[in-house]
Image (cartoon, helix red, strand yellow):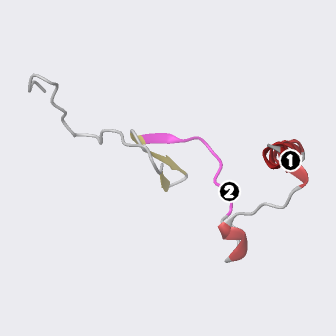
Amino acid sequence: MTVVAAGALVAQTAIQHSESLPDFNASNWFGSKPAPIAGVASVIDGDTIEIHGERIRFNGIDAPESKQYCDDGKGAR
């Protein structure tokens, strides 16, 4: 039980001071970060937006595409 309590204390301390910790992101190890994209977004599909001509597709979101028809449980569109 002592090891679990010590681990919880370390995790809580790390979370409280996370702004002072280095960013352990894989992109930091393998090259420069891409420049942030800022501006007004236009919705292309349920999982895609466009900002200044740059299309951004959200990972892990499954949304219907435009012109995609879905059937309900009774087979109706």
Question: What's drawn in magenta, residue-wise?
Answer: 35-43
Q: Position of residue 71 (x, y in %)?
A: 15, 30
User: Label 1's element?
Assistant: helix
Most distant residue in the front direction: 1
Residue 6 is labelled as 1
User: Foreground mark, 1 or 2?
Assistant: 1
Quadrant the C terminus occupies: top left
Nearer to the camera, 13 or 17? 13
Q: Amino acid at mark 1?
A: Ala
Magenta segment includes 56: no
User: Label 2's element?
Assistant: loop
Residue shown at 63%/45% (left/top)? 39
Distance CA(mark 1)–CA(mark 2): 38 Å
- Along the horizontal axis of the image, is 74 left or right of 41? left
Q: Position of residue 41 (x, y in %)?
A: 54, 41
Q: Position of residue 4 (x, y in %)?
A: 78, 45
Residue shown at 70%/63% (left/top)? 25
Q: Of marks 1 and 2, which one's residue comes earlier in the chain?
A: 1
Mark 2 burial class by Cα count in 10 Å: few <14, some 14-19, many 20+: few
Q: Which residue is mark 2?
A: 36
Q: Amino acid at mark 2?
A: Pro
